[in-house]
Amino acid sequence: MVASESEADKLPVVGKPVRGSHTGRPIMALLDLLGRRWTLRVLWELRDGASVTFRELQSLTGGVSASVLNDRLRELRDVRIVETDSKGYRLTVDGLELVAALGPLQVWVGRWDDRA
C-alpha cells in the first residue's frame, strides 16, 4: 500500500491551489516551491553552474537527509530548474536565471540589515 501524498509534498502547479494561494498564480507556485525545506540552500550551492554529485551536494548543504535532498532535487528537476549530467546535478539555464533574479533580494537585505 502506498501512502497518499500530503498537500505539502505535491509539486506546486500554476493554476492550481498552492500554499498561500487558492488561484495558483505563477509567483505563488514559485514561492511555494522555494519555501520548501532546503530548496533555497540547494539553489545556493548550485549557483555557480558547476555540476556536483549527490554526496557533494549533501555535504555542501550541511548534511540534509538523503530523502529530503532527493525530494528537493526531484521537484527542481520536474520544473526544469535543475538537471543532471554525467558529473551530477547542476542548474539549467532557467535555474541560473532564477538565481540571478533573486540577486536584488540580496541588495534589499543588505539595506534592511543596516536599518535593523
Image (tube, rainbow, N blue to C red):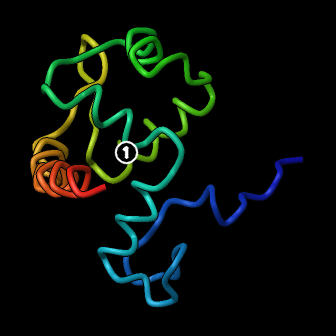
Q: Quadrant of residue 32?
A: bottom left
Percent x, y of residue 105: 19, 55
Of residues 37 and 84, which is closer to you in this image?
37
71 displayed left or right of 24: right
Residue 91 position (above or below residue 10) = above
Which amino acid, mark 1? Leu
Residue at the extreme right: 1
User: Mark 1 — residue?
Assistant: 76
Percent x, y of residue 72: 48, 40
Residue at the extreme front: 115
Disc 1 crowd, CA 10 A, few/some/many (<14, 14-19, 20+): many
66 displayed left or right of 2: left
Of residues 59 and 81, which is closer to you in this image?
59
Q: Quadrant of residue 15?
A: bottom left
Percent x, y of residue 112: 23, 57
Say which element carries label 1.
helix
Residue 7 position (above or below residue 72) = below
Of residues 18 and 87, which is closer to you in this image?
18
Residue depicted at 48% across the width and 81% down the height: 16
Residue at the extreme bottom: 23
Residue 41 position (above or below residue 21) = above
User: Quadrant location of the C terminus?
Assistant: bottom left
Residue depicted at 37% across the width and 42% down the height: 40
Percent x, y of residue 51: 22, 17
